[in-house]
Image (cartoon, rainbow, N blue to C red):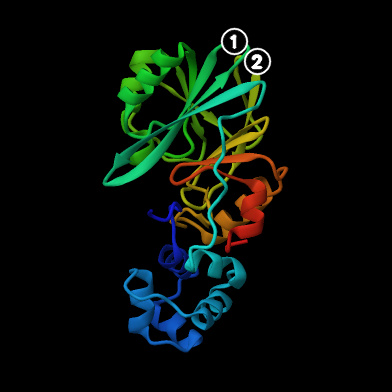
């Protein structure tokens, strides 16, 4: 069975290296390995030794024990059963985009059957089908960030549902068929009886954000199980914002990422090598 994580050892060290603006030559010299071997590790054609894992972790400011767990495929988050929060339900819609799965979610208020669509997974038809299957009323579209794999099909969803669309004020704006409502950190959007709070999680994009309600946080590409999103804008902003605004939440809060499996705050504090 394929390893379940979105990012494995090669992705992790590559993201950490690029985020810190280090070349292959820089890291290879500091870690005492050849540049060729480092490149092959990032490309999954060479498995590192335990000594190499710890040395690379030291050079890249990662946690060596946690990185070794992932390098040796000894950890992945425990499977999370159907959501048992008495106030809400979460439906995952996962579909390929560019050959890789991307996640969108329906956040459903059990008391009112109102729902938020969180990102689009580039497949509005699948989302509309799930709305029909679960007989819920969509009232908002919440965008964690504007990359195409998370916003393709947005105009189709807007026209089909009539929902208001919310996006962070600092985020570049995607193609849209309706006015976009800008939000900032700590703003609240109502979905039925639920209050959904905006959390700043920039770094992958300028205005990346997450959405928190009760025991669930929808984190886009800010953090994955055992990794983080590509630090396209600022590695330090991504690390700081996730640490301050996501990993400061209670351990039982479920994290629903844009790619890969669902995890929890507690799992990431124990196993994510970036923290």
Q: Please tell me in which quadrant of the rendered image residue 264 appears.
A: top right
The residue singled out by tag 1 in the image is 112
Query: In terms of depth relative to the viewer, which is nearer, 213 or 268?
Result: 268
The residue singled out by tag 2 in the image is 193
Q: Position of residue 146 (x, y in %)?
A: 41, 39
Marks 2 and 1, Cα distance to the nearest angstrom?
7 Å
Residue 163 in the figure: left or right of residue 264: left
Q: Please tell me in which quadrant of the rendered image residue 75 appears.
A: bottom right
Label 2 Cα crowd, 10 Å radius (few <14 / some 14-19 / many 20+): some
Q: Position of residue 253 (x, y in %)?
A: 66, 39
Residue 147 appears in the rendering: no
Task: Tell me the element at label 1.
Answer: loop
Q: Position of residue 156 (x, y in %)?
A: 31, 21
- Residue at left offset 52%, top offset 60%: 235
- Residue at left offset 68%, top offset 50%: 244
Task: Tell me the element at label 2.
Answer: loop
- Residue at left offset 43%, top offset 33%: 104
Contact flag, marks 2 and 1 (Cβ < 8 Å): yes
- Using the image, determine if residue 135 lies above or below residue 26: above
Residue 63 in the figure: left or right of residue 102: right
């Amino acid at each position: 069975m394929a390893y379940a994580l979105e990012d494995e050892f090669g992705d992790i060290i590559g993201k950490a290296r690029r985020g810190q603006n280090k070349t292959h030559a820089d890291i290879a010299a500091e870690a005492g390995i050849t540049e060729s071997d480092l490149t092959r590790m990032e490309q999954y054609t060479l498995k590192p030794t335990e000594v190499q894992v710890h040395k690379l972790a030291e050079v890249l400011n990662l946690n060596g024990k946690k990185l070794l767990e992932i390098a040796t495929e000894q950890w992945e988050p425990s499977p999370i059963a159907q959501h048992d929060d008495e106030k809400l339900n979460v439906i995952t819609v996962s579909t390929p985009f560019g050959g890789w799965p991307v996640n969108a979610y329906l956040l459903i208020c059990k008391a009112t059957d109102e729902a938020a669509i969180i990102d689009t997974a580039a497949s509005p038809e699948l989302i509309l089908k799930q709305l029909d299957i679960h007989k819920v009323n969509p009232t908002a579209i919440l965008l964690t960030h504007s990359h195409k794999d998370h916003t393709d099909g947005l105009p189709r969803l807007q026209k089909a549902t009539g929902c208001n669309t919310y996006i962070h004020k600092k985020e570049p704006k995607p193609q849209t068929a309706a006015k976009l409502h800008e939000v900032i950190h700590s703003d609240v959007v109502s979905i039925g009886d639920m209050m959904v709070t905006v959390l700043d999680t920039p770094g992958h994009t300028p205005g990346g954000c997450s959405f928190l309600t009760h025991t669930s946080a929808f984190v886009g590409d800010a953090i994955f199980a055992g990794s983080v999103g590509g630090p396209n804008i600022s590695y330090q902003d991504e690390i700081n914002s996730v640490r301050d605004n996501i990993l400061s939440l209670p351990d039982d809060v479920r994290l629903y990422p844009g790619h890969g499996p669902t995890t929890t705050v507690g799992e990431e504090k124990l196993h994510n090598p970036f923290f």
